[in-house]
Amino acid sequence: MHRRGVGAGAIAKKKLAEAKYKERGTVLAEDQLAQMSKQLDMFKTNLEEFASKHKQEIRKNPEFRVQFQDMCATIGVDPLASGKGFWSEMLGVGDFYYELGVQIIEVCLALKHRNGGLITLEELHQQVLKGRGKFAQDVSQDDLIRAIKKLKALGTGFGIIPVGGTYLIQSVPAELNMDHTVVLQLAEKNGYVTVSDVKASLKWETERARQVLEHLLKEGLAWLDLQAPGEAHYWLPALFTDLYSQEITAEEAREALP
């Protein structure tokens, strides 16, 4: 049986229907976008009202400040993005994190001769609190991390390295790759590692382990103990727990500043 072809009228009708569906889909998408934009504006307005009402708590309470930062992040608002505008004028958060960043730099400079430019987040927190005094605005470790991320964005050599359940803060522009990071994590338990430790734990060849440790030594991030029993120990001064309680003397702080 001869099959009839599709007529020109049917083709035109089909194209018209497809065009209408496409047009309708565009209208729906535009309506949804407008509605989402309206909701976002409403959220931002409510957030500003919330900030105005609770600004004292946001300034003084670190836990409340973390929750407020999380609220801002959910709608794409960054109170730290600029030192001007509503957030800075209302809350002073821009100034707060700027001043905190300066304090972090001062502490890291003062301790660099001890730790080579690596410091645990806990020790940094402790030293910053000591420097601020008991009547100053309280600071949390979350505040420190946020301030350090802002310093990092400025290309100042600052970085955050996860180590076990905490972080090491890098304050010198040393090139550290994943190999260096995993060795730092390995050293967390004892404060030091050996070539044999690295080989056994990470299944590396001797040369790879030695190169990584020598790089840390070269950058001033590790100390070499040739008198240790067995084989040479590479100590990471940033992980010395007995240094955590030591205070920075005024003389050390003055000598560290340019």
Image (cartoon, helix red, strand yellow):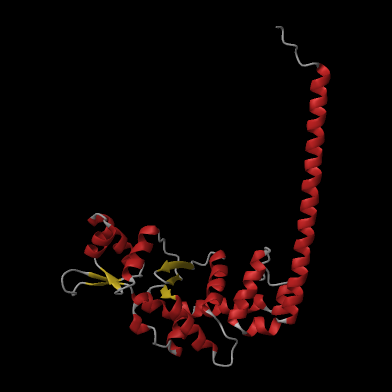
Between 15 and 240, which is closer to the camera in this rendering? 15
Q: Residue furthest left?
A: 230
Q: Residue furthest front?
A: 1
Answer with left or right where residue 72 lies relative to residue 196: right
Answer with left or right where residue 81 lies relative to residue 168: right
In percent of the image, x 81 and y 38: which residue is there? Answer: 23
Establish if 81 lies above or below 253: above
Please give the count of numbered marks on the rendered protein: 0
Q: Residue furthest top?
A: 1
Establish if 42 lies above or below 255: above
Between 48 and 25, which is closer to the camera in this rendering? 25
Task: Decide if residue 109 is in sight here.
Answer: no
Position of the N terminus, as image quadrant, is: top right
Could you say where residue 134 lies in the image, as x and y percent from the top left? 55, 92
Could you say where residue 83 lies in the image, as x and y percent from the top left? 68, 72
Task: Decide if residue 28 is in sight here.
Answer: yes
Could you say where residue 109 lies in the image, as x and y percent from the top left? 46, 77
Which quadrant of the figure has residue 120?
bottom left
Which quadrant of the figure has residue 90?
bottom right
Could you say where residue 124 lies in the image, as x and y percent from the top left? 46, 79
